[in-house]
Image (cartoon, rainbow, N blue to C red):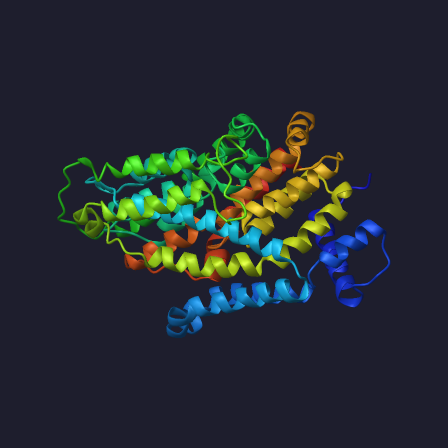
């Protein structure tokens, strides 16, 4: 079979999109025709593109306007897509499904944000490149236990405080790279796409058994790069004398909130697809899991130590920003995801391992990586005549040829670090850092100055060694 590159796939996708523009009533087989009628117009990707451009340009070009009106902009653009689906496509399922995913997403982020906000970690030790490397390594490991969101929210404030005398944007950028994204690639708890795979039937320990030898050298390489950056920064700052004395003590306050974190992690598994005894609340767009998580938001904040909240400079602005922006992102990306899913299935037979890796990664950087993961997993299984919605087929797929699954899993998690919107914790870490007085790079500067020159070569090497 002829081998097609990622760029060939994009060309095919572009050509087919042009076809959709030109003739939505083209003659196809009866099955394809049924699917075609369900496809949204390619024009409906515009609200999503507009939202991304405004997220990128708003804080720079029209900061005051954006700061005051971003909730309205996100909601209005989301409502445009919603109205299109309800009125023109008569498609209620896509909206309800997206609403359910958004509620699960925001319930997890909000509960972890509030619960971790009530925990104060104090490391009274002088910041050095080695201390920072060990801190980031610890974050990468525990992100597989409490998720990238949990690890990010728990550790970002102490990381900022450790480096308070010489904090630079690159400190936060590497924190996002390592703790908020790449670190969580070893377990289904680590990152949402892997958990969706677990719900579909992928064995819990498959990830760590099949990804650790990719995860480990990537993490080590990223830490070495950070060490070089941090050492150069420390050398530049060496001329500045500091009279601060350090005790070397390590202290944790608000440890009762660790119980809330445990409750959140346990509740993640309270899904009817995982545990049959868990009742489904359908047709409601949430379940027992989300009820527990929102309860944790209320209880952990109400019972939190006020001194700890004050020391953490805790407020709800970061989660508010994420909640408003991501409801817009979730809604406006529905057409893009459906068009991509259609193209992936149409061309699944000619897609190779490397294509799955680059396509999943590229789209995970700007779309929610969870549905992107599922779309390409479905396409990969389609190569073997298997259905992603049938658990036995998923198990058979894992046993038959898991190289596609490995490529999709690694790419969905790793490439989430490419942009601020690639993964939920990214935006929250950025928001918390900015409220701490750190001048973070804009959306485009983040990509051009950090993601492309630092991450892209690493991801290219990963592809060259493991998926070429």
Report the number of discs. Answer: 0
- Image spot of residue 2 (x, y percent): 81, 41
| Of 362 and 206, the residue lying toward us | 206
Residue 122's place in the image compared with 10, above or below, is above
In the picture, residue 63 is in which quadrant? bottom left
Residue at the image point whose x is 68% and y is 38% from the top: 353
Residue at (42, 41) in percent of width and height: 148
Please provide percent x and percent y for residue 414: 52, 43
**Visible residue check, residue 251:** yes
Q: How far from the left and from the top, in percent, is residue 295?
A: 34, 45
Q: Residue at x 72, y 57 (%)?
A: 38
> Is 160 on the left-hand or right-hand side of 451?
left
Q: Is residue 399 above or below residue 404?
A: above
Front-most of residues 41 and 449: 41
- The quadrant of the picture occupied by the N terminus is top right
Q: Position of residue 132 (x, y in %)?
A: 32, 40
- Asked whether residue 221 is in view, the answer is no
Quarter the C terminus occupies: top right
Q: Is residue 381 left or right of residue 201?
A: right
- Residue drawn at x 70%, y 64% as measured from the top left: 41
């Amino acid at each position: 079979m002829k081998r097609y590159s990622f760029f060939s796939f994009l060309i095919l996708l572009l050509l087919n999109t042009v076809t959709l523009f030109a003739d939505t009533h083209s003659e196809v087989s009866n099955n394809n025709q049924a699917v075609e009628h369900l496809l949204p117009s390619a024009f409906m990707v515009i609200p999503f593109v507009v939202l991304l451009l405004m997220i990128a340009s708003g804080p720079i070009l029209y900061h005051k306007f954006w700061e005051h009106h971003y909730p309205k902009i996100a909601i209005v653009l989301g409502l445009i897509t919603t109205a299109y689906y309800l009125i023109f496509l008569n498609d209620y399922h896509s909206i309800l499904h997206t609403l359910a995913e958004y509620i699960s997403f925001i319930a997890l982020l909000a509960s972890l944000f509030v619960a971790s906000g009530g925990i104060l970690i104090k490391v009274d030790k002088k910041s050095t490149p080695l201390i920072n490397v060990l801190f980031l390594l610890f974050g990468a490991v525990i992100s597989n236990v409490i998720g990238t969101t949990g690890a990010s929210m728990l550790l970002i404030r102490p990381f900022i405080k450790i480096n308070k005398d010489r904090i630079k944007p690159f400190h936060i950028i590497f924190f996002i790279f390592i703790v908020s994204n790449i670190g969580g690639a070893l377990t289904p708890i680590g990152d949402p796409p892997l958990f969706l795979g677990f719900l579909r039937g992928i064995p819990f320990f498959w990830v760590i058994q099949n990804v650790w030898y990719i995860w480990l050298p990537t993490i080590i390489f990223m830490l070495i790069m950070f060490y070089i950056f941090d050492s150069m920064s420390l050398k530049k700052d060496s001329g500045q004398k500091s009279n601060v004395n350090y005790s070397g003590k390590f202290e944790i306050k608000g440890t009762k909130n660790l119980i809330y974190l445990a409750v959140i992690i346990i509740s993640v598994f309270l899904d009817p697809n995982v545990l049959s005894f868990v009742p489904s609340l359908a047709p409601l767009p949430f379940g027992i899991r989300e009820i527990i998580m929102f309860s944790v938001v209320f209880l952990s904040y109400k019972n939190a130590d006020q001194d700890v909240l004050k020391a953490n400079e805790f407020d709800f602005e970061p989660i508010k920003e994420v909640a408003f922006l991501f409801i817009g992102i979730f809604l406006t990306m529905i057409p893009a995801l459906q068009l991509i899913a259609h193209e992936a299935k149409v061309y699944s037979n000619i897609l190779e391992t490397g294509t799955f890796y680059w396509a999943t990664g590229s789209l995970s950087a700007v779309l929610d990586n969870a549905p992107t993961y599922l779309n390409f997993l479905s396409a990969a299984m389609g190569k073997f005549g298997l259905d992603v919605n049938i658990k036995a087929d998923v198990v058979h797929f894992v046993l038959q040829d898991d190289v596609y699954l490995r490529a999709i899993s690694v790419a969905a998690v790793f490439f989430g670090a490419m942009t601020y919107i690639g993964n939920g914790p990214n935006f929250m870490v950025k928001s918390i850092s900015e409220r701490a007085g750190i001048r973070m790079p804009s959306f485009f500067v983040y990509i051009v100055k950090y993601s492309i020159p630092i991450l892209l070569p690493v991801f290219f090497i990963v592809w060259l060694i493991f998926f070429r």
